[in-house]
Amino acid sequence: TDRIADVFTRLRNGQRYRLDSCRMMKTNMTVDLLKFLLSEGYIRGFEILGQEPRQEVRVFLKYDENYKGVIHKIRRVSKPSRRIFVSIKDLPPSHHGLGCWILRTGTAGFVSDATARRLNTGGEVVGEVF
């Protein structure tokens, strides 16, 4: 199963129905991706629930003053059936600089395209958030 696509779908569906939070299974990759989304300001926070080995993560979704979701679009780019790797010079701006690409690098984990440009490193283009 594709855990990253599952995270994106749960976030998208949660904001579509204006939920305060949504739940998903906890994996190390899920927690790393949520830490990235929290640092970029796309979610309010998250908490880990339950005991090992059946832990879940509750993600608190973020809305603006008109109760519209902060995440307008989130999509998976690289898939398990087709991985997409780029060098940083080949990565175009996302939505004319309003969004960001989510890259997974070998050393820094999940980073935005701006951070990857600063680190001068490429990686797998996991997704795009806007």
Image (cartoon, helix red, strand yellow):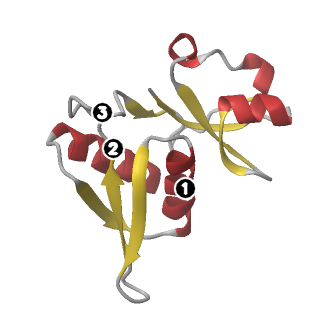
- Number of the label disc, if any, that sits on residue 113: none
Label 3 sits on what residue type?
Asp
How many discs mark residues in the rendered view? 3
Front-most of residues 85 and 97: 97
Dot 2 crowding, Cα within 10 Å, few <14, some 14–19, many 20+:
many
| Image quadrant where residue 125 sits | top right
Sequence-wise, the earlier of marks 1 and 2 is: 1
Write down the residue under mark 1: 35
- Kindly state the secondary structure of the residue where label 3 is placed: loop
Write down the residue under mark 3: 64
Q: Quadrant of the C terminus?
A: top left
Dot 1 crowding, Cα within 10 Å, few <14, some 14–19, many 20+:
some
| Image quadrant where residue 59 sits | bottom left
Residue drawn at 57 percent across, 59 percent down: 32
Residue drawn at 55 percent across, 19 percent down: 94
- Kindly state the secondary structure of the residue where label 1 is placed: helix
Residue 23 lies left or right of residue 102; in this view the side is left
- Number of the label disc, if any, that sits on residue 62: 2
Label 1 sits on what residue type?
Lys
Work out which residue is located at the far top of the displayed protein and give it.
96
Q: Distance from label 1 to label 2 (Cα)?
A: 14 Å
Residue 79 lies left or right of residue 106; in this view the side is left
Above or below 129: residue 4? below
Q: Quadrant of the N terminus?
A: bottom left
Q: Distance from label 3 to label 1 (Cα)?
A: 20 Å
Residue drawn at 50 percent across, 50 percent down: 38
Sequence-wise, the earlier of marks 3 and 1 is: 1
